[in-house]
Every structure is written in C-alpha cells, then in structure tokens.
Image: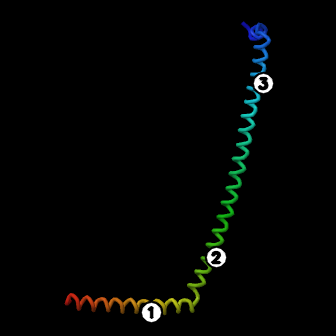
Amino acid sequence: MNVKNLYNKLKIKNKLILVHFSIVLSICVVSIVALQAALRFYDDLLYNEAAEVLNLSTINIENELRKMESLSYAMVSDQSVQEIISFTGQRVFKKSMKSFMNLKEKMDMQYGI
C-alpha cells in the first residue's frame, strides 16, 4: 500500500490530526535547530570574550612582573640600599648571637655543662 492511498482512506478528523501533528513536529524540529544555532553562537561569543579577558590579564601580569624586575634590579644595584641591608643584617645577626649566648649561659647554669 502506498502512503497516498492510506492518507486518502483516512477520515477527515484523522487527516486534520495528522496535518496538525506534522506542523507541530516540523515547528519543534525548526525550534531545536534554531536553539542549537543560537547556543553555538553564544558559546563562541563566550569563548572569545573569555580569551580576550585572559589575554588582557596576562598582559597586565607581565607588565607588573616587569615593574617588579626593574625595581628589584634598582634595589640590588643601589649602593645606599645595599648599605642599609648590610647594616640591618649585621644588627640582626648581633642580636641573634646575643640571644643565643644568653640562652647558652642559662642552659650551662641550669644543667651544669
């Protein structure tokens, strides 16, 4: 049997139901395809925006690292900064040695070493 013959044998009510069902089905298919296209477009747009933001963030971080590098170099090469660091280091070392010697004396007295 042929589809056309089958369709012709249907009652009017069933023909209308079949036509309506076909229209609803085609609208659903078109809607799903349109939704998929819109989502794909949105995903591409979101990906491009995220890539752009990451690129800008990377550039900013690189610029800050360059600034830190130049500041570090300036500190290392500046004689006055080196003198201050050396003086502070000597003071800390002397203070640490004094604390160590006091602790050693206390332990010597306590344990009789």
Which amino acid does the dot numbered 3 rest on? Ile
Question: Mark 2: few, some, or many residues within 10 Å (few <14, many ≥20)?
Answer: few
Question: Mark 1: few, some, or many residues within 10 Å (few <14, many ≥20)?
Answer: few
Residue identifier under label 1: 91
Which amino acid does the dot numbered 1 rest on? Arg
Q: Where is 20 relative to 36, above or below?
A: above
Q: Helix, strand or loop at disc 2? A: helix
Q: Is residue 2 left or right of residue 74?
A: right
Q: Name the residue nearer the viewer: 54 or 6.
A: 6
Q: Residue at x 66, y 60 (%)?
A: 54
Q: CA distance from mark 1 to mark 2?
A: 30 Å
Q: Helix, strand or loop at disc 3? A: helix
Q: CA distance from mark 3 to mark 1?
A: 90 Å
Labels 2 and 3: the sequence-earlier one: 3
Q: Quadrant of the N terminus?
A: top right
Labels 1 and 2: the sequence-earlier one: 2
Residue identifier under label 3: 23
Which amino acid does the dot numbered 2 rest on? Lys
Q: Quadrant of the C terminus?
A: bottom left
**Residue 73: x and y, percent?**
59, 81
Q: Residue at x 36, y 90 (%)?
A: 99
Residue furthest toward the front?
13
Q: CA distance from mark 2 to mark 3?
A: 66 Å
Classify residue 49 by image quadrant: bottom right
Q: Residue at x 68, y 51 (%)?
A: 47
Q: Residue at x 70, y 53 (%)?
A: 48
Mark toward the viewer: 2 or 3: 3
Q: Helix, strand or loop at disc 1? A: helix
Q: Is residue 76 left or right of residue 58?
A: left
Residue identifier under label 2: 67
